Image: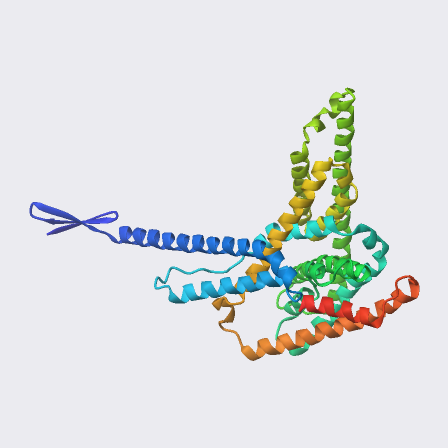
Amino acid sequence: RNQQMSGATIEVLDGSNATQAPGPLQQDAATAEDVGETILEAQRSFIVLIVLLLITCFTLGEWVTRKSRYLTEGSFACIVGLVGGLILLVINLTQTDIHWHVSLAFPSEYFLDVLLPPIIFYQGFSVHKNRLFSNTALIALFGILGTLISFGIISLAIAMLRMFESSTVLRLGSIMSATDSVAVLQILNPQDYPFLHSISFGEGVLNDASAIVLLRSVRRTFENQSSSSTGESEMTVSTLFEILGSFALTFVLSLTMGVSVGLISALIMKMNAKQTRRSVNSHRTFSMSIFENLTVTHQCGFLVLLAYLAYILAEALSLSGIVTLFFCGLTMSHYTYYNLEAAAQITTNHVFHAMSLLAEISIYLYVGMDSLYRGNWTNVSVWRVVVLVVVLLISIVVSRVIFVLPICYLQNLWNKRHKLQLSEMLIIIWVSKKNRA
């Protein structure tokens, strides 16, 4: 009997009869193909579930928030996400195929490059500009100075636990110093509380941008220290000043880029408006005829692409795309919007709102689903988690009280028309504390 190895098969020669048996390479290829099909099936099932949950939120979200004063659209999406997470948990537990597994691993790039930009841009585009500009100083104190104070107090409280390294302490402090400005829209009614709404919303928007810039400044500072020295980087006074300097420089440059791109878009749309009037009067110039092609659809797409270009350029230059995008949206709503055609103004409002709402609901859905993901609760010390959560909640409340009350009293001194009562100060503390928690 002669055995001849030939690639992926083995020929067995026995007299005049010859048969072929599958070799190890063929078996491995077949197994890999089956595993790939199983994984693809799991991914398709996950996408179908996500789409069904999104349809549920878009269909019932507005109705539920009108019927219940205790539920916002975001909290309803979290509840729907919990239901979806429970479904995935049951499927993963009952599935007999070990390769059939739905993972909720979510790359941060998808969040930063896909979901976050529409939300931030619409916040800047839809903000009430008169209230924002009339309370600029107060909002800046809450959004920038308050963020830095919260960052310091929360980081100090976490450092006292001695659970994490210095870089992790500062990163966690910058993350927990952020608030959720979207929820303010649903908690405070702008018709009933216009002044409180404008302050809380403006602070939330500016706080989001400041917290992200602060987080990146912390990460960049420790990366530079680790690349220039060996061993663990320590937190010193010079490190804190380096973080604050990087924060200020990044914020100013990002703001400048956002405003510049917004003004460029306003200039181009103004040229388009002038060329349209010239076309009506039959006085055409060849140099401006290119702008005749900017129809309503083109104008809407042009604003979306230009805003996203500003975001990508800021990220490529190691600036804050979030700050750039917010002030780009703010500038576009203040200047570019009024140079658009009437139909384009309506279209851009609805398109930007729909994109923002879709991204926002997707994030809340994922938060609800991720809460029941088994991978989050493996190799975790329960008591450490409980202690950390309690310390974070206490430090959040303390930090809010420390900077909200003095700033509110300063507001009462320099602004005699809008004096804040103690109850209103407590509302500002409670709203932002609730969102951050």
* Quarter of the image where the C terminus is located: bottom right
Direction from residue 243 to residue 48 in the image, left or right = left
- Residue in the picture at 74% in, 36% down: 340
- Residue in the picture at 74% in, 21% down: 286
Viewer-closest of 78 and 378: 78
Direction from residue 155 to residue 362 in the image, left or right = left
Q: Position of residue 60 (x, y in %)?
A: 58, 57
- The image's colouring method is rainbow
- Residue in the picture at 77% in, 64% down: 241
Residue 142's place in the image compared with 309, above or below, is: below
- Is residue 217 visible in the rendered structure shown here? no
Viewer-closest of 429 and 148: 429
Q: Residue furthest front?
A: 67
Direction from residue 302 to residue 5 in the image, left or right = left
Q: Residue furthest left?
A: 15
Q: Position of residue 269 (x, y in %)?
A: 75, 35
Q: Position of residue 359 (x, y in %)?
A: 60, 53
Say how many tags the image has.
0
Residue 287's place in the image compared with 233, above or below, is: above
- Is residue 352 visible in the rendered structure shown here? yes
Q: Position of residue 366 (x, y in %)?
A: 55, 60
- Residue in the picture at 78% in, 39% down: 338
